Amino acid sequence: MASETQFIDRAGILGSFKGDSKIFSGEVKVNMMFKDNSWRNFGGGLVEFSKNARSAWHTHPAGQTLIVTDGEILTSTESGESFIAKKGDVISCPPNIKHFHGATSKSSGAHIALTGTKDSKNVTWLELVSDEEYKNALQKASDK
């Protein structure tokens, strides 16, 4: 929506949905907040993960910023970098880094995802994260 003035995307106007089992493991709810438009090259959504829930591996052609709003969020890259972020922390993922994120085994978690758009695309979904990959990422992150 292009506009000559400020406008409000009212909470819930874009809807919410349960995370699809093809791209999420466990219970995940995605609440769409706003979309990219002619002057904003990113969209936003609130993603809520139950304990142990997580996204599939994926990349973002224009990067992604996650603002943790509740609980704990585990994030890990294909290269093995793993971190646990807590409420108020910000996770910055540069373009085209293969990664996943979700809750830890001890806590549910939520984040606002600000996801850039490039050539009308914001994400490339890949394979699901295995239980072993998830446990290894948790262990690496917990050791820090």
Image (cartoon, helix red, strand yellow):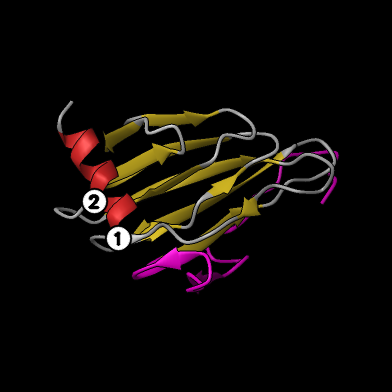
Helix, strand or loop for disc 1 = helix
Is 19 colored magenta in this rendering?
yes
Q: Position of residue 134 (x, y in %)?
A: 30, 52
Is 16 colored magenta in this rendering?
yes
| Separation of marks 2 and 1 at Cα, in angstroms | 6 Å
Q: Nearer the viewer, residue 68 or 95?
A: 95
Which residue in the structure is indicated by mark 2? 135
Residue type, label 2: Lys
> For mark 1, does the 10 Å Cα neighbourhood hold few (<14), some (14 to 19), or many (20 or more) residues?
few
Q: Residue at x 75, y 37 (%)?
A: 40
Circle number at residue 131: 1
Helix, strand or loop for disc 2 = helix
Any part of residue 103 in sight? no
To which quarter of the image does residue 115 belong? top right
Q: Position of residue 120 (x, y in %)?
A: 82, 48
Q: Is residue 8 left or right of residue 11?
A: right
Number of numbered discs overlaid on the protein picture:
2
Q: Position of residue 129 (x, y in %)?
A: 41, 57
Q: Nearer the viewer, residue 105 or 135?
A: 135
Q: Magenta-highlighted stretch: main secondary structure?
A: loop
Q: Residue at x 69, y 51 (%)?
A: 35
User: What's the magenta region?
Assistant: 1-28
Q: Position of residue 72 (x, y in %)?
A: 25, 44
Are the two marked residues, 2 and 1, in contact with CB atoms closer than 8 angstroms?
A: yes
To which quarter of the image does residue 63 belong? top right
Q: Which quarter shows the C terminus? A: top left
